[in-house]
Image (cartoon, rainbow, N blue to C red):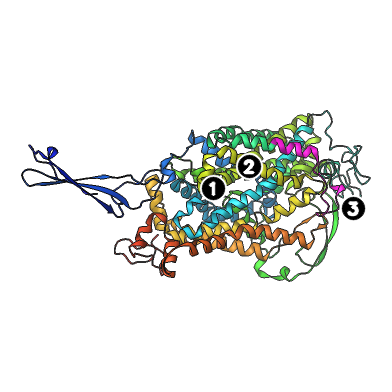
Amino acid sequence: MLRPKRKKPGSLGSNLPMSKSKCSVGPMSSVVAPAKESNAVGPREVELILVKEQNGVQLTNSTLINPPQTPVEAQERETWSKKIDFLLSVIGFAVDLANVWRFPYLCYKNGGGAFLVPYLLFMVIAGMPLFYMELALGQFNREGAAGVWKICPILKGVGFTVILISFYVGFFYNVIIAWALHYFFSSFTMDLPWIHCNNTWNSPNCSDAHASNSSDGLGLNDTFGTTPAAEYFERGVLHLHQSSGIDDLGPPRWQLTACLVLVIVLLYFSLWKGVKTSGKVVWITATMPYVVLTALLLRGVTLPGALDGIKAYLSVDFYRLCEASVSPGPIVVDSPLRQRDCVTGILHTVQRPNLWLSNNSFLSCEVWIDAATQVCFSLGIGFGVLIAFSSYNKFTNNCYRDAIITTSINSLTSFSSGFVVFSFLGYMAQKHNVPIGDVATDGPGLIFIIYPEAIATLPLSSAWAAVFFLMLLTLGIDSAMGGMESVITGLVDEFQLLHRHRELFTLGIVLATFLLSLFCVTNGGIYVFTLLDHFAAGTSILFGVLIEAIGVAWFYGVKQFSDDIKQMTGQRPNLYWRLCWKLVSPCFLLYVVVVSIVTFRPPHYGDYIFPDWANALGWIIATSSMAMVPIYATYKFCSLPGSFREKLAYAITPEKDRQLVDRGEVRQFTNWTINEGNDPSGPAM
């Protein structure tokens, strides 16, 4: 900015004629402090006023004319009412149903306490750095998953990728909450409906779990027998017996549809006013699970056999860390296996085909693969939720401390929930006189079949069932809220028309989710659910996080990213975090993406094998989100002016630095960083 010379005493300049001229002043980022809500700095028009004094001395003065404002600058961004609202929202999103049904089983299956070694290793070198990166990215740029990519415009498609994935996940995740709500209402009876075989929905194969202690399984007396709990879930709730497959869905079931409507209404009124309302809802939904888990733990450890279950959970087998094997399932060595389906509870014989993958040394570290994928999915990285939530923080919030606190709580919750789960599984194993491996499972089968059956044997079983399913409701609701907020914030920040009508847009999103979720509450809805669960957020979400990590570390630059964090928190990330962002995390993600592709297996539900057209549809769903990256990159590149080199320079240069390209100071493609001053060196960390 042009500085005025000091006016001498006795000057009469204020009474003399003035001459005015206007000039366009170039980049002023080094002088004009950027607005807190935006980092965009562009050319400014300055009015230069020359005042000729009587003694011949000239005084120059300048004023900024019509300073340009971005939409974000023009309207101050909403922030969390309290810091605890943000923390509870992040914790509530990250701590979801998978913490209860997935982690404890993986820990048991993969060497007990030994599984914690690869899990904690990957958490420290990849999980925490990526979590920290997303919080800092959203907080500094103050926009959703798409808007933050003004740091590298050509990669903005990854923002739309994660938004689309979150939208897809809502189609089936809300259905899980509807199931839990159905079970919650069904718990208010004297006799729980899943303890006997004398109900209208039961089949001749139903075997009363209380009438048999067969060593063949959970109250099963033949290969094709099923428990009352399994039949209640499949026949009483899902009505799966009325469908022959995914090509025979039938109409939506009115009971589940009503539960789904209640879930959608709750989500809408939790989100319609933004973080001001959702920040209050999480005070209940994020804390209630811990109260219930504590109560269930205190009850579980008093049950007979609970200690055996906990010992099985924590038993340390370090040989599993270097054992050469592949994941259990269809792709294994050629031998018959008698196993229980993880959802239906049916015990059946499976002939395991001898495929080439069984001898592939690339798949020899099953424990490490399980640990890597669990870290990625348990923290909720890559769904755009962390970016959306942190974008509503105050600019100077300590996002580093938030990342450490929330990731630690997430891991501790996963580990502690294992004590709850396996105390009840140990009780069930002793009750039916079977090995604990026969009752240990994961997925919906654990929380909708095994656990309800265990609760049904307790005194005051109806009360315990209501409490348990209330916990599932709260675990699911705040995670669903996070996914919806990612979609809403990402698109509202990108399109100002939607910003002006946020409430209507929120209504449109939840209604669209509801209509598409209806396919999952039909007679054959579990097949649609399984297909979406398998394809919607598998390899695609890992791909999205990989591109995100590369974009921040290698295109935007770790040095610039670290400077942004220092501007917010006053402290630059140390060498450890910079190395993780630059090298370790991208390599880790690349490994996980490749493994997920190489070890891919088509989905199945029990003995049902999906037809080829269903698998093709699943891949269309998966690739539709990943395709946003190359589609938007192509669009952006073609829409930019100039030569090929100039287009590329504009495409990978942060929007706030575009004037550097205008002046010919284009990005140096050999070192992937913008030269600062006269320093031609490569990217610094």
11 and 413: which one is in front?
11
Q: Is residue 405 visible?
A: no
Say the numbered circle drawn on residue 508. 2
Q: Amino acid at mark 3?
A: Thr
Instruction: Determine crowd level at label 3: few under 14, some 14-19, many 20+ residues with C-alpha closer than 10 A.
Output: some
Query: In the shown orientation, is residue 370 left or right of residue 246?
Result: left
Percent position of residue 245, x then y: 83, 54
Q: CA distance from mark 3 to mark 1?
A: 50 Å
Q: Residue at x 75, y 64 (%)?
A: 331
Q: CA distance from mark 1 to mark 2?
A: 15 Å
Check the image and report above or below for 506 versus 580: above
428 and 476: which one is in front?
476
Tell me the quadrant of the picture where the C terminus can be found. Answer: bottom left
Say the numbered circle drawn on residue 54. none
Q: Amino acid at mark 1?
A: Gly
Helix, strand, or loop for circle 2?
Answer: helix
682 and 471: which one is in front?
682
Percent position of residue 43, x then y: 33, 53
Count how many numbered circles sit on residues in the image: 3
The residue at which mark 3 appears reads as 223
